[in-house]
Amino acid sequence: MDSKSTGTSSTATLKVKDHTVEMPLRSGTIGPDVIDVGKLYKETDCFNYDPGFTSTANCSSKITYIDGDKGVLLHRGYPIDQLAEQSNFVEVCHLLLNGELPTESEYQEFSGAITRHTMVHEQMTRFFTGFRRDAHPMAVMCGVVGALSAFYHDSTDINDPEQRTIAARRLIAKMPTIAAMAYKYAIGQPFIYPRNDLDYTSNFLQMCFAVPCEPYTVDPVISRALDRIFILHADHEQNASTSTVRLAGSSGANPFACIAAGIACLWGPAHGGANEAALNMLKEIGSVDRIPEYVKKAKDKTSGFRLMGFGHRVYKNYDPRAKVMQKTCHEVLDALGIRDEPLLKVAMELERIALEDDYFVEKKLYPNIDFYSGITLRALNFPVEMFTVLFAVARTVGWVAQWKEMIEDPEQRIGRPRQLYVGEASREFIPRTERG
């Protein structure tokens, strides 16, 4: 394949058998150019083969930019570390949804709208009793979020901009309430209703940990730490769950169904369950003196063991979110007086090795966000089953922003990936009595 510049545009020339096709090169604001292969099949009778779509852009987007080689993550142009350190989650939600950081009046309106939508329909409290008490909270989340479309008919028309806005705000507001209800149901405690006098993250903490029989005071350090975790997980470009939301939405499905699809995808251990896997690995190692044994196993391809929380599908440098998460982890452990947490010592020694050992440096196996978030969430007293639920609470705004952008994109059509068929060719049917 050759590429050439043609004045103000560029093209790539592809020769396939007796066919030659020129395809336009499209440039984004930053990042690599893409080859528009829209007419490839029509002109060459060939598809492009890309398992996992790792070399395929299925949309154009203005929301999130990642440079994995340089360790860069931008939301609407703002570096993730600046947002995590200087902003709050609700403000980041406004940024992702609307493209700009809000003015003071815009923030008050948006924040107030989110607060007023935190309650769920009272009949939904009875919906939870249909699940076994030992059901995984993510299973409950899938069912309950999908059922929102049965309760909020006035915000399911995707062609109405006002209904899209209402649905977006409802999802962001109600997800913490639903997540807290799933947690309370699992441990056999009564549901705690949201409070309009608390901020987004503090409200979530009180819904999770307050009980009716005594007052509960939210620790501001803990609330700020969880708020930062939410920011770090708010969006991450076209990952598996986001792509699932976009694909479901491309059919015209209502927003609640699309987000439920995203939750189901996030549940996979290779996606949202990675921080739980990293924590379980640290537990398995147990102490610093056993680290050499596990590092040796990680280097042995025949051992079947791999270090969880290291490396990333996209980042080939230090995950920019991991740096903020490391600081947040230390703040939480200090605030709770558990600075000598054994798992943290194991984590810190593993990090030191990963950053200095030639094997890990050569393979660019740097610690990622999951490496520290599992320890932090454990310190906050969340059970491991809730880790992915918290991820879903944070990622909802990213899903909704991406869904909204897709609906408003005139280039988008219903998703229809193609395949390389490797099954049997055409065969004649033989009656069952005649088959040998």
Image: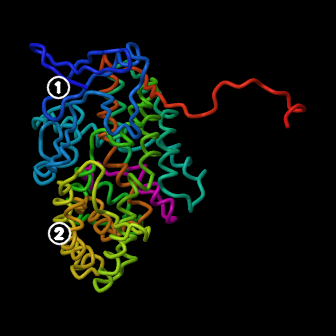
Image quadrant occupied by the C terminus: top right
- Residue labelled with disc 1: 27
Q: Earlier in the sequence, mark 1 or mark 2?
A: 1
Q: Relative to 423, is 354 on the left or the right?
A: left
Residue neighbourhood size for the residue with mark 2, other residues' Cα within 10 Å, grouped as few (<14), some (14–19), many (≥20): some
Residue neighbourhood size for the residue with mark 1, other residues' Cα within 10 Å, grouped as few (<14), some (14–19), many (≥20): few
- Residue labelled with disc 2: 331
In the rendered view, would you say 294 is above or below 249?
below
Instruction: Return the residue nearer the eye: 348 or 173.
Output: 348
Q: Secondary structure at mark 1?
A: loop
Q: Relative to 423, is 194 on the left or the right?
A: left
- The location of residue 35, given as percent across then percent down, is 25, 25
Residue at the far right: name it.
433
Residue 65 falls within the magenta-colored stretch: no
Q: Relative to 309, is 330 on the left or the right?
A: left
Q: Secondary structure at mark 2?
A: helix
**The magenta stretch spans which residues?**
177-201
Please name the residue shown 18% across and 73% down the image.
352
Please name the residue shown 36% across and 21% down the image.
16
Look at the numbered discs 1 and 2 and tell me whether their residues touch, using CB distance below 8 Å. Answer: no
Residue type, mark 1 in image: Ser
Q: How many marks?
A: 2
Image quadrant occupied by the N terminus: top left
Residue type, mark 2 in image: Glu
Where is residue 30, by image quadrant? top left
